[in-house]
């Protein structure tokens, strides 16, 4: 950590600060310049509060040099993490296609979609049973019944299932789910992250709508620091001024997260755009940018979907897209 | 709801849509223009999914006319709601000053600050016991012990206490708290909102960093639809490109929320700016814009605060500010 | 245009508005609902000011149905526009690679880079002679001398040249330039757009940092309405809260602009990210999303570039990337 | 400037960089830590390109300590600048009320409004003659004729006139205007800034929709570095995800700009909100936050305004507001 003092700081104030910092257990290297004095703090600075130091009268600015994330930091773990779900692998060169409806609606629906996406080459099945909805008056999902229907679809197709958990109270119901999804709105629900960190299940962690990459990694850190290292990061669009799409897919998050972390990174073009006809080009873009997988909404009858029909592909559209994704992967291999 | 059809839609497709809409229980008024046909839907359109209709081949755009929020909507409840906490009132002309440290740290600290802010004219005491922190390695609050210290400070000063709840699992611990605070990161933790809606405690609901006013109102709606109508809305800054302050305080949210809803609206200039010296001007701005109250961080020793010291006022600074706030209130009365 | 009146509007006020609208030359279809009355305006509504109507006491909301852009609107011109620059074509299936240094620095530099990018397969040469810089103390470009050096590089390689124009006063100097570039900061410098619209040169129009797609198209409209239809749109990143990259490349703008307009759409990954190592993945993403070309910064000696060295590729890196771009194009053909 | 090297940098590469930096004319203080080496650069670092240094292989990060703005920097000019326009003063305790219509439409209109706002206490008259409009099909202003009408209104009322200039080509027409306004869209039209810097007229410089405070100050620097130090800064709202108001007024820019610069800071609540009924609360907020003045749109007949009628106050509303503003100013004196 670097602390830049204000010009013309009195010597005793400076020494007082240096003593205090040493008392916090860090070494201090002092560099006195003509106009400014700079303190270089070495050692374990994770316990120092930057805001606090920045607020002192004699301090001009503070800069942290070491990122505060450790478990997920590529610096300390140079090799890619490969998350394994049954026979399916994600990361480190393994590309994973996750697909399914926004919401589980009925046995017929989920089985129909599961078979169709498997046929098209999907590796896992997604489907919402517990649905976070902006309005209390909107369909909130089939809940426990939805989870049972997902398991039936898994039995029929062999596809592992991914589904969102919204509350620690529901954890027992997710015992037999393959991948726990943490949604964008819960990315900083820290109690949920800690509890999930105490399970041994792979976690699909979505970036919040207004969260920086560092905050996403700190949330992964909550899960990993609790003992669960099987985390898949997911970019799903951020909130910007732009109003043609629901959110703005930040494709550059893919290579940037790969640089910062060893965890696999997948992309959700369905929620990012909210518009079915933009899903294929954005899925292809994410693939070309190096994503480790895609999570895409597919519905057998989008106009009658109970949720987010506008962004769901039909099975035949998904099959076309999967073919193109494979072509890009081959071209870039 | 207005549905605008694409140009040159075939008559039978149009009739098919109209039949389907009528089957959903709404009346449909058709207005055929030279280039475009417009359907005006009248009746209970809350069950219609705009996205679904918007996704149909023959539909150009859909516009909802009635806001989907009801309980908190001023249209259906023209008078201001006054939330009462013991003898303290907020809203409808009653202005409420809430102050205290970011985190409860010790008995001495919380009592010192409580007495100081009471002396300065504060009506309620704030203090974090359960702290949402971006990093799992940062101080997470004194938790249950912190709640006990708040109660001691209340006993000493008579000030009602406001403190954040992060998880439904903690609800029993908050039995004797006066106002439950829902933080910005949990604004769309819908399970938490529903559970809090089943208590009879006043709720201070903070706007999320990237949430629209409509989303804030829909979250208030979750609480109110569960039976608890004592909701106080709080603007605390939004995330923008601007990087001089931690967040950008959206002062215009105050008059806008007053127009849309009958609930009281308060402002948190401390978290919005993250800089103590900007707290007074922004507190004054919020007051002049018509806020029903202010929640401000005050610490007896900001440089040694365990959390957010950089944005905390000293007691004497708070007393100065409170005096100015009263002057503005008097000037505008 | 749709005008939704407030509930319970008095009949004579409503009739007064309808008369006024008819006086403005549009037909009005009235649809009286149980709660609300809707006016559908048909005819030439381009002269009606939405804001004005929206401000009337009796009006609840106004919605424009027809987009206000005409010349660049795909609805009125379904076929892709192909912009031709010498033998080079852009749009309608023709993909164009534009490359070169941020700034023209010397004859040796521009010729070295021009030869290298031509060798790698580039179709046009870019290079800044007039440089828009945030600081008046930063290098402002070689100006007229820089334009001469670009022409020399063109003579050496045969590559057409693209360079930015910042002021109408400089137009005579650009007589012999092949493509005029309008930078992001000048996207709404309407006098510049109008003047350029009166030339017969192809224009590369960059999206402003905080401009919507509609505003970009309206700026294209300024050029086209003045008589020049040879406009190439360029996405170059928008300003968001995200701070890891300089800007956030909005890849979804590519398919969305193709849907709204017949003009070619290219992408600038260099300015969008500001980080050389992110340029290849984002260039590939843009290609996979359907861009009609790429404009990329290449410098023979990035650490000694006078401007934006941090985002420039070395010639060999550019050659590698160009190869990958061709692979993706082939895979998707 | 602080340069942080990557861990384990080879000694000869480090020495090479240090030599190069010294060759650029700065002193280098080296601080070798256990994990990281830090270079403190002292001297005139304005000519060093941070991006370039940041791009070097061995560099982890670079931080500029001294702001790159000088003329407008409060550090080098602690006293408030007072801009004088005839008898009117702005800044340093002098508060200035500027008001008038968005566009000058007719002699009768501008004189009516000018008399009304003078009566209400306004100090200067605003009115657009050259109008920047998103659409080429919208009313573009009366241009030179509009300037003449403003001068007539000035002759009638004695109010100095403020009006926007969009192009250097129009400068001769503005010879007899009192204050030149640079609009948000032209905040980084650097050629315009330089030309205006060569006049001796006070300049009202509006912040761009997506520009940081530093960029606003750098644009002021362009004007001042050209010799004209009479610059008034104007906050007029930034573009965010929030969609209830046209833009989000960043009230915190007022105290922050006062801290960074000695120039006067005024606020435009009309363009920031785009909604007349939000203008009074936001004008009061800006005043309470310490603004040096307000620029507000007033129209004698808002529903028939040719531009931005929705955000204009009627003269009697403006008179009410002016009264409240004076009350707040008195309360805070």
Image (cartoon, coloured by chain):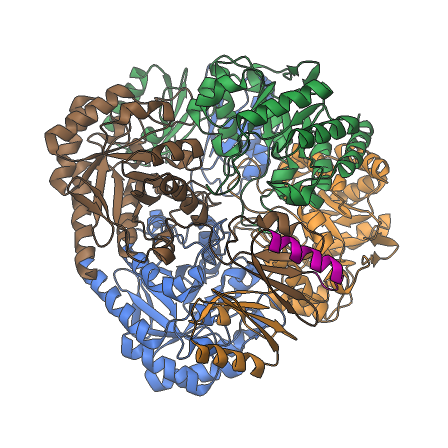
Chain colours: A orange, B blue, C green, D brown
Horizontal and vertical percent position of residue A160? 82, 53
Residue situated in front as seen by the camera: D15 or C224: D15
Q: Is residue C312 left or right of residue B9?
A: right
At a point 52% along the width and 81% down the height, the residue shown is A20
**Residue D28 visible from this viewpoint:** yes
Return the residue found at the far right.
A87
- Quadrant of residue D126 in the image? top left
Horizontal and vertical percent position of residue D66? 48, 57
> What kind of secondary structure does the magenta stretch mostly adopt?
helix
Quadrant where the C terminus of chain B is found in the figure: bottom left
Q: Is residue C225 left or right of residue B49?
A: left
- Quadrant of residue B234 in the image? bottom left
At a point 68% along the width and 62% down the height, the residue shown is A220
Give the mark count.
0
At a point 18% along the width and 35% down the height, the residue shown is D160
Horizontal and vertical percent position of residue D200? 28, 36
Taking the magenta stretch, the answer to whether it contains residue D12 is: yes
The stretch of residues the image draws in magenta is D6-23
Residue situated in front as seen by the camera: B307 or D316: B307
Taking the magenta stretch, the answer to whether it contains residue B201 is: no
Q: Is residue C78 above or below residue A261?
A: above
Q: Is residue C201 above or below residue A36?
A: above
Residue situated in front as seen by the camera: D82 or D162: D82
**Residue C31 visible from this viewpoint:** no
Q: Is residue C21 above or below residue C184?
A: above
Horizontal and vertical percent position of residue A4? 51, 66
Q: Is residue A227 left or right of residue D262?
A: right
Q: Is residue A205 above or below residue B121?
A: above
- Quadrant of residue A27 in the image? bottom right
């Amino acid at each position: 950590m670097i602390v830049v003092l204000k010009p013309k700081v009195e010597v005793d104030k400076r020494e007082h600060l240096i003593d205090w910092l040493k008392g916090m257990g860090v070494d201090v290297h002092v560099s006195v310049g003509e106009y400014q004095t700079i303190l270089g703090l070495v050692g374990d600075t994770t316990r120092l509060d930057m805001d606090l130091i920045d607020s002192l009268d004699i301090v001009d600015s503070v800069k942290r040099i070491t990122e505060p994330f450790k478990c997920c930091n590529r610096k300390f773990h140079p090799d890619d993490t490969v998350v394994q779900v049954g026979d399916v692998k994600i990361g480190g060169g393994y590309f994973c296609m996750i697909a399914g409806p926004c919401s589980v609606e009925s046995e017929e629906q989920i089985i129909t979609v599961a078979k169709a996406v498997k046929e098209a080459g999907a590796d896992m099945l997604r489907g919402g049973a517990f649905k976070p909805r902006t309005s209390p008056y909107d369909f909130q999902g089939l809940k426990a019944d939805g989870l049972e229907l997902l398991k039936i679809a898994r039995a029929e197709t062999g596809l592992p299932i991914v589904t969102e958990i919204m509350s620690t109270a529901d954890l027992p119901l997710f015992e037999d789910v393959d991948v726990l999804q943490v949604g964008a709105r819960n990315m900083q629900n820290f109690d949920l992250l800690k509890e999930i960190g105490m399970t041994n299940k792979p976690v699909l962690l979505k970036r919040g709508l207004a969260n920086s990459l560092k905050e996403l990694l700190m949330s992964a850190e909550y899960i990993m620091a609790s003992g669960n290292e099987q985390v898949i990061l997911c970019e799903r669009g951020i909130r910007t001024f732009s109003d043609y799409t629901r959110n703005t897919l930040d494709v550059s998050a893919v290579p940037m997260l790969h640089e910062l972390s060893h965890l696999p990174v997948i992309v959700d073009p369905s929620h990012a755009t909210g518009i079915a006809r933009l899903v294929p080009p954005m899925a292809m873009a994410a693939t070309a940018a190096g994503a480790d997988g895609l999570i895409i909404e597919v519905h057998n009858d989008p106009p009658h979907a109970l949720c987010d029909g506008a962004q769901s592909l039909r099975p035949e559209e998904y099959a076309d897209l999967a073919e193109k994704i494979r072509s890009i992967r081959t071209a870039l291999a």
